[in-house]
Image: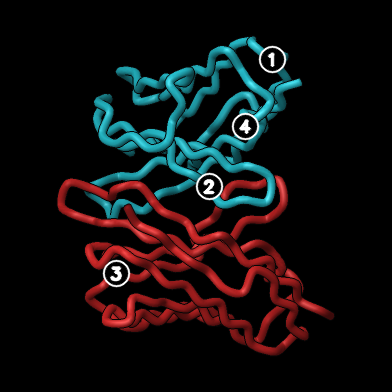
Amino acid sequence: GENVEQHPSTLSVQEGDSAVIKCTYSDSASNYFPWYKQELGKGPQLIIDIRSNVGEKKDQRIAVTLNKTAKHFSLHITETQPEDSAVYFCAASIFSNFGNEKLTFGTGTRLTIIP
Amino acid sequence: AAGVIQSPRHLIKEKRETATLKCYPIPRHDTVYWYQQGPGQDPQFLISFYEKMQSDKGSIPDRFSAQQFSDYHSELNMSSLELGDSALYFCASSNTQARNIQYFGAGTRLSVL
């Protein structure tokens, strides 16, 4: 089955600086890679996703890059703000015309923004 | 916009008791997923249903069962509860005709004493 590794497990960044979180996956059939943000006591919230037919996607301060050959993808947050502090999970899945298979999550990164 | 609704939000049970968790997906979503998240861990897939039929199964104990009803809500039934079942249980739903993004509920925190 799919195995997703995520690094680092904790990350502290000065407010206004950038944060980068990296993930690798094992199953070359995976073609859908979402990133979720989880705040304390809440469910994971999708912040951005990328499909394997593109290499990069950006949404305001958040961007994701995908290297299918190397089987890794990264989350980039620029101009970090205190409200970005949370646990971030990457995930991998197989998407087909019949729907998504289960998400396999990375182990999470606890991001702390230092004011 | 409507979100995934889970009930109850918190549940306290004794060992060997049973528990039933409920999930109400976003309207017009046809797929429901259940995940278990232990303390400090990532969510682990348990089971999913597409159009009321089981579509995939993960590391779900035999003591657990789930189903999706005609109104698309789903229930996770857990019997002979063990201390190790204490976790957050999330339900997610998606629409296969609309990018199939999985949207998560706020979860049910189960504590087994």
What chain does badge 4 belong to?
B
| CB atoms of marks 1 and 2 within 8 Å | no
Q: What element carries label 2?
A: loop
State the hue of chain B: cyan
Colour red, chain: A
Give the residue drawn at x 42%, y 63%. Answer: A34
Q: Using a 10 Å C-alpha cutoff, classify the residue at mark 1 as few (fewer than 14 neighbours), some (14 to 19) or many (20 or more).
A: some
Q: Nearer the viewer, mark 1 or mark 4?
A: 1
B64 and B74: which is toward the camera: B64
The residue singled out by tag 3 in the image is: A51
The residue singled out by tag 4 in the image is: B108
Residue type, numbered disc 4: Thr
> Residue B76, percent across and down?
47, 22
Most extreme residue toward the right is A115
The residue singled out by tag 1 in the image is: B15
Give the residue drawn at x 29%, y 69%. Answer: A51
The residue singled out by tag 2 in the image is: B43
> Residue A68, percent across and down?
28, 78
Q: In this view, does A97 lie above or below B91?
A: below
- Respond whether the residues carrying marks 4 and 3 are from the same subunit: no
Residue type, numbered disc 3: Arg
What chain does badge 1 belong to?
B
